[in-house]
Image (cartoon, grey):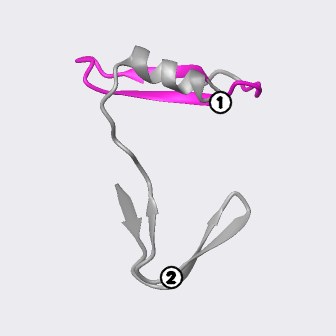
Amino acid sequence: MRLVSLFDQFVALDGERFPFERGEHVVTEYSHKFTDEGFLGMASRAGFRARKHWIDRRRRFSVHYLTRSDAEAPVAAP
């Protein structure tokens, strides 16, 4: 999924400004099909640590909160 800027603009985020030209896009999501175990194994090999995950009731999708393996972060509340 991506968002496309309809006009030249600046977007402010966390005290920083990011320029976008008309027609420029930013990727906001990648959707891939993995098992939870397969995804977490791949994330671990890439240097990430699982902090929290959410799974829908039908177990059809999940969202994972990852941090770098060398970074300490508080665990997100459900």
Residue bearing mark 1: 67
Cβ atoms under marks 2 and 1 closer than 8 Å = no
**What amino acid is labelled 1 in the image?**
Thr
Q: Residue 31 got which mark?
A: none
Residue that appears at 39% across and 80% down: 6
Q: Does residue 3 lie above or below 9 as drawn? A: above
Residue bearing mark 2: 21
Chain-order first, disc 2 or disc 1? 2
Query: Horizontal and vertical percent for residue 19?
Result: 60, 76
Q: Does residue 13 lie above or below 51 as drawn? A: below
Query: Horizontal and vertical percent for residue 60?
Result: 25, 24
Q: Which residues are magenta?
A: 49-73
**What amino acid is labelled 2 in the image?**
Glu
Secondary structure found at label 1: strand
Q: Does residue 78 lie above or below 15 as drawn? A: above
Task: Give the image quarter of residue 49.
Answer: top right
Q: Residue furthest top?
A: 37
Q: Is residue 18 rendered magenta in the image?
A: no
Question: Dot 1 surroundings within 10 Å: few (below 14), some, or many (20 or more)?
Answer: some
